[in-house]
Image (spheres, rainbow, N blue to C red):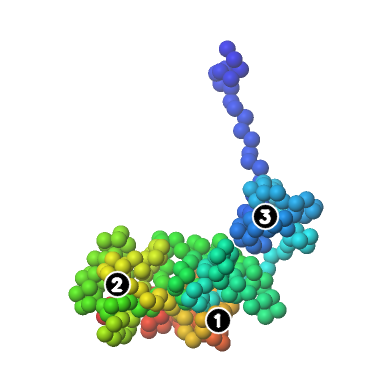
Amino acid sequence: MSRKSKPGRKKRVFPPMAGHTVDRWISKLGLGTRGMAREWVQDGRLALGDGRPVQNVDQFVGGTPGCEPVFRLDGKILSADPPAVFAFNKPRGVLVTRTDPGGRETICESIGRFSEPRTGIDMSRMMPVGRLDQASSGLILLSNRSSELSALLNPSLDFPREYRVQVRPSLKKSDWETGLSDGKWSRDLGFKPVDVRYEKENLRTTWLRVGLKEGKNREIRRLFERGGYEVLHLIRVGFGPFCLKDLPPGGIVDVSSFFLCKGKIVLDIILDMIRSGDIIEVKENGVVVSPGNSGGGAGDLRKS
């Protein structure tokens, strides 16, 4: 009988080594995103604390809480900025990505003018929370801890989003009643019902306010395509408790204080504001909070 088959012999189990891959460490330590880590490695800019170049982002690096590894970028030790969150009014035509091989403007380039001397934060480390497609515009959050905020996008949270939508041709009464109000188009596509109300219309187009909590890929565009309508403009004006006011396209406002407790991001702060009906008005000169306001901010859409 071989040693392997001896009855009662237990296989030794070794505990896993403490640590992460390089890209995971970069994200976890707030030094950048995984995508940034890949770019740095590809360009030969990233090294370990002792100066050894990192050859692969999948390289395992040991470390434990309180004894994390050190990394160098271009020979200088990388250090984390404090957690920061900004509200940005994304202009139409800007891609929500770090780079584009086609040379189109990206969101990172769009915020590039907000340099460290102005904000006190390295804006090159800011990454979007969620997405807006190239043809859409409006409110999007940016953070140097975007991975910690991604939980807000979990469909189970019913995180509200509000949009101004212009469709062509002008919306028919029958489509309003059956396709939208009764939720037929949403059911046909397997979506949750959306909240819709009229804003204004003319003979050729209709402007609507659309509120949703699911946020599937191209959900609003697909919804109106189902009814035979073309979406001409799609502008996000509400995201969670944040409501876009007079912030111009390309404008950016620091909203970190609404997320931080003792220097750490605490999502319950924002979730409690949503439950309480608080509205954070994102304005050109800052933000205004209207506690308990239920007069038309994010998440307060009613069918008319």
- The residue at the far left in this view is 174
Q: CA distance from mark 2 to mark 3?
A: 44 Å
| Residue 11: image location, x then y, percent | 59, 27
How many badges with numbers are in the image?
3
Mark closest to the chain's N terminus, 1 or 3? 3
N-term-proximal mark, 2 vs 1: 2
Q: Is residue 196 left or right of residue 88?
A: left
The residue that mark 3 highlights is 42
Residue visible at 79% across and 60% down in the picture = 75
Distance between the alpha carbons at the discs numbered 2 and 1: 31 Å
Taking the spot 33% from the left edge, 73% from the top edge, the residue there is 230
Residue 229 badge: 2
Residue type, mark 1 in image: Gly
Report the front residue among 204 and 234.
204
Is residue 199 depicted above or below 3 in this figure?
below
Residue closest to the eye, 154 or 257:
154
